[in-house]
């Protein structure tokens, strides 16, 4: 679970592990620019994988008053870079067993 705040701080939680980190300024700027360039309200609220696909990471993105649920194999292309940047924050700030897979 990753909560990213406007000031660039992030809270990363998984299982019994929790930490607060300061996101690199370059990463925070890139993420802010990406989110500003996407029509979040034009996206659907749910992107579910086929039932036979199992053990997938699930992503929930809440931004600009909209929440989007996605599963690993059906992340909309326009959000791939966003998800990768969010995963990068986790990977660079948390133990290996917390790190989700890169999508691109």
Image (cartoon, helix red, strand yellow):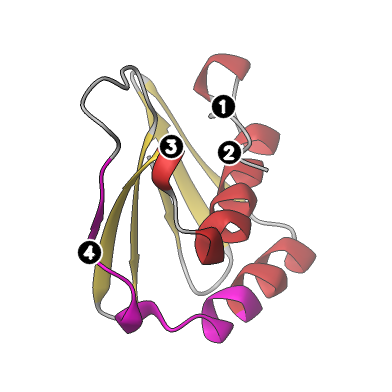
Please identify, in this view, whether the residue under mark 4 or under mark 1 is nearer the observer: 4
N-terminal-most mark, 4 or 3: 4
Residue 34 location, x and y as percent?
Answer: 61, 75
Between residues 103 and 88, which one lies in front from this camera angle? Answer: 103
Query: Few, some or many C-alpha atoms within 10 Å of disc 2 (few <14, some 14-19, many ≥20)?
Result: many
N-terminal-most mark, 1 or 2: 2
In the image, 30: left or right of 68? Answer: right
Query: Few, some or many C-alpha atoms within 10 Å of disc 4 (few <14, some 14-19, many ≥20)?
Result: some
Please identify, in this view, whether the residue under mark 1 or under mark 3 is nearer the observer: 3
Determine the secondary structure under disc 1: loop
Which residue is disc 3 drawn over?
A: 72
Which residue is disc 1 drawn over?
A: 99
Q: Quick check: marks 4 and 2 in contact, CB under 8 Å?
A: no
Which residue is disc 4 drawn over?
A: 45
The region drawn magenta spans 33-48
Between residues 94 and 80, which one lies in front from this camera angle? Answer: 80
Query: Few, some or many C-alpha atoms within 10 Å of disc 1 (few <14, some 14-19, many ≥20)?
Result: some
């Amino acid at each position: 679970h990753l909560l990213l705040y406007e000031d660039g701080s992030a809270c990363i939680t998984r299982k019994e592990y929790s930490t607060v980190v300061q996101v690199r300024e370059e990463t925070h700027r890139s993420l802010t620019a990406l989110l500003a360039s996407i029509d979040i309200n034009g996206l659907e609220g749910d992107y579910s994988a086929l039932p036979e696909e199992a053990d997938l990471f699930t992503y929930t993105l809440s931004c600009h008053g909209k929440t989007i649920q996605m599963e690993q194999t059906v992340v909309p292309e326009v959000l791939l870079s966003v998800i990768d940047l969010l995963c990068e924050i986790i990977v660079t700030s948390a133990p290996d067993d917390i790190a989700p897979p890169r999508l691109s």
